[in-house]
Image (cartoon, rainbow, N blue to C red):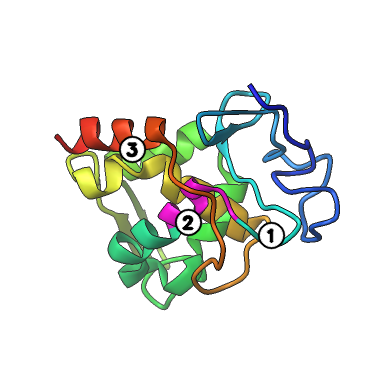
Amino acid sequence: MEQPDATGGQDADAGGAAGAESKFAVSYEEDGRYWTAEDTPTFHVGEDGTVDWLTYSGFRRYHSECHVCHGPDGEGSSYAPAIKNSAVRMDYYDFYDVVVNGRKHVGAAGNSVMPAFGDNANVMCYLDDIYVYLAARGDGVVPRGRPGDREDKSDAIREAENACLG
């Protein structure tokens, strides 16, 4: 098990908002996935801007399922909030719960409804990817637009994806 840097998911000289105190700091890497000390998925951005596979995949999955409401790059829209901020503010498990079960807020300012995606394989099979991408966007280490260079997809990630999609 490789022990990458612990600087908020990025190499020490990569820049960005993440720092040693970031809740997204990489604790360890296993089969192409990066994890925090709390065993939640996180991102890794190299000095040259290369992103891990899940961050790259998360960009693609987010833009196929989520951006219609939440806007390009998680920036929000007139219809739904900037979800990149949710990935930073919310605990991973709370984020997961909202995506799976949805959420409804009714108030004097109006109604807000996040539909449940628990039955949508295009979301659920890639929920960690989407979370990691949004966390990297919200933490300020991945800019708007398609990530440039990326790590290769590991065999373990490929097998998990195939098992999930059937």
Q: Nearer the viewer, residue 24 or 43?
A: 43
- SS label for mark 1: loop
Q: Label 1 sits on what residue type?
A: Val
Q: Where in the figure is residue 161, as x and y percent of width and height? A: 29, 37
Residue depicted at 19% across the width and 38% down the height: 165
Number of the label disc, if any, that sits on residue 56: 2
Residue depicted at 24% across the width and 46% down the height: 117
Q: Label 2 sits on what residue type?
A: Tyr
Question: Mark 2 to mark 3: distance in Å?
Answer: 14 Å
Which is nearer the N-term, disc 2 or disc 3?
2
Number of the label disc, if any, that sits on residue 158: 3
Residue depicted at 49% across the width and 70% down the height: 146
* Residue bearing mark 1: 141
Start and end of the magenta stretch?
51-58
Q: How many marks?
A: 3
Marks 2, 1: nearer the viewer: 2
Q: Label 3 sits on what residue type?
A: Arg
Q: Nearer the viewer, residue 140 or 7?
A: 7
